[in-house]
Amino acid sequence: MSLAPGQVRDAIVGYLEALGADASIAEIYEAVVRQLGEVPSSSVRSYLNLNASEIFERTDIGRYRLRAGLHELYLKEPPQYLDFECALSTLVQADCFEWLARQEASSIQAVVTDPPYGLVEYSPKEQAKLRKRSGGVWRIPPSFDGHKRSPLPRFTVLTEQDRRELHSFFKRLAVQLVRVLVPGANVVVASNPLLCHVVSSAMTEGGLELRGSIVRLIMTMRGGDRPKNAHKEFPGVSVMPRSMWEPWVVLRKPLEGRVQDNLRKWKTGGFRRLSATQPFPDVIKSQRATSLERKMAPHPSLKPQAFLRQIIRGVLPLGQGTILDPFAGSGSSLAAANALSYKSIGLEQDKQYFEMASNAIPKLSSVAG
C-alpha cells in the first residue's frame, strides 16, 4: 500500500496525543496499523528513533511519549460536534478519545458506561449485519412464547488478537479518563463474565484503582446451550452455565488525601448510601428493560431505567457533579441522570444511535421510577 507523505507521522502523533501518556513501540505500531492498515514496522520504529529529541521523549527502553509543549502544536482544529440537549444532559456525536483529549483536566466527577467491550460487535461491518438481522458476531435468539428476543453478541468467538485489542482499548480509555476525572471519581463499567477480567486489568494499568464490582442479577439468554450439532447425542450437557448475572466493574481515580479530604474538596470518594442505615450494595436485582423502554429506545444493549437510576444515584456520593457516559448508545444513562436531576454528558459516535438517543432521552427520562 502506498502512503501519502506524513501519514505514518500523523498516525503516531495522533495516537500519542490522544493517549496523553507514553506507549511501547508495539502499542504505537498496532495503533498505526489500525488506522492505516499494514505498514512496515521498521517505518514506525525509524520515525520514533529519528525524532526522539525533536518530537518525542523516550521514557524507557522502547517507550515513547509526545514531547512536552507539542500538544497544542499537533492538535488539529476542533471538530464541529453535533450535540443535543435535554434538561441537564448533553449528548455529543463524537469519538470519545478525540473528545476526551480536548477536555479540561479534573472536570468530570463520575463515569457510568456500557461500552462496546467486545469491540468487534460495534464495528461498521457487524452493525450492518445486526441491522439486517443476519447474525455475524451477533446471535439472534429464537422466539420464545411468541416473543422475539434481543440480539446478543457472541463473545466466545473473540480471538486472542481481539482480546489484545480490547486490553489496549480499555487501557487507553483509562489513561484519558484519569486526566479528565477529579480525584476520587467513580468509574462503573458494564461488562460480562467472560471479559470483565480483561477490562479490569487494562483499566488499572491505565491508572485507575479497582474497587470491586456491582453484580446485576439478571437472567440472560447467554450460555446453557447443548453442544452444537450434537445436542441429541449429549442432551444432558450445557457447554457453559446459563448466565444469571452481569458484572459492572467498579474503579476509582486515586484519592487526594483521605476520603474526608477528598469529599470536602472534590465532592467524590465514595458511593451515596441508600439511606442513613443502608449502604450502597454491590448486588442489585434487575429485570430486562420494559417493553415500553425498548419501544422508546430499540438499542441491542439497552439497560432498564430502574437499574440505571440506582447506579447513577450512587456514583455521586454527595449528589453533586457531572456524570460522563463515553459510549452513550441509546442515551439511557443520560435519561437516568435527568430523572435524578444530575448533570450528565454522553458521547456517541454512531450517527444512527445518536439520532435514536436524541429521540429517546426525553421519553426515557419520564419513565416512572
Image: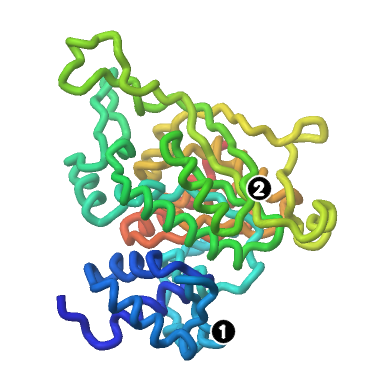
In the displayed structure, 239 sits above or below 184; it is: above
Q: Nearer the viewer, mark 1 or mark 2?
A: 1
Foreground residue among 74 and 25: 25
Instruction: Check disc 2: other Cα within 10 Å, few if <14, some if 14-19, many if 20+.
Output: many
Say if residue 363 shows up in the picture: no
> Looking at the image, which residue is at 65% across and 56% down?
253
Residue farthest front in this picture: 61
> Looking at the image, which residue is at 28% across and 72% down?
41
Q: Is residue 35 left or right of residue 74?
A: left
Could you tell me which quadrant the N terminus lies in? bottom left
Q: Is residue 77 left or right of residue 145?
A: right
Foreground residue among 232 and 126: 232
In the displayed structure, 110 sits above or below 291; it is: below
Please state the horizontal and vertical placement of residue 310, each as a whole percent of the image. 62, 39
The kind of residue tagged 1 is Ala
The kind of residue tagged 2 is Val
Instruction: Check disc 1: other Cα within 10 Å, few if <14, some if 14-19, many if 20+.
Output: few
Please state the horizontal and vertical placement of residue 21, each as a whole percent of the image. 53, 70
Say if residue 242 shows up in the picture: yes
Q: Considering the numbered disc 1 on the image, is that residue within a helix, a strand or a loop?
A: loop
Q: CA distance from mark 1 to mark 2?
A: 34 Å
Please state the horizontal and vertical placement of residue 192, each as a whole percent of the image. 44, 37
Q: Considering the numbered disc 2 on the image, is that residue within a helix, a strand or a loop?
A: helix
Labelled disc at residue 68:
1
> Looking at the image, which residue is at 38% across and 76% down?
12
Q: Is residue 275 left or right of residue 232?
A: right
Labelled disc at residue 315:
2
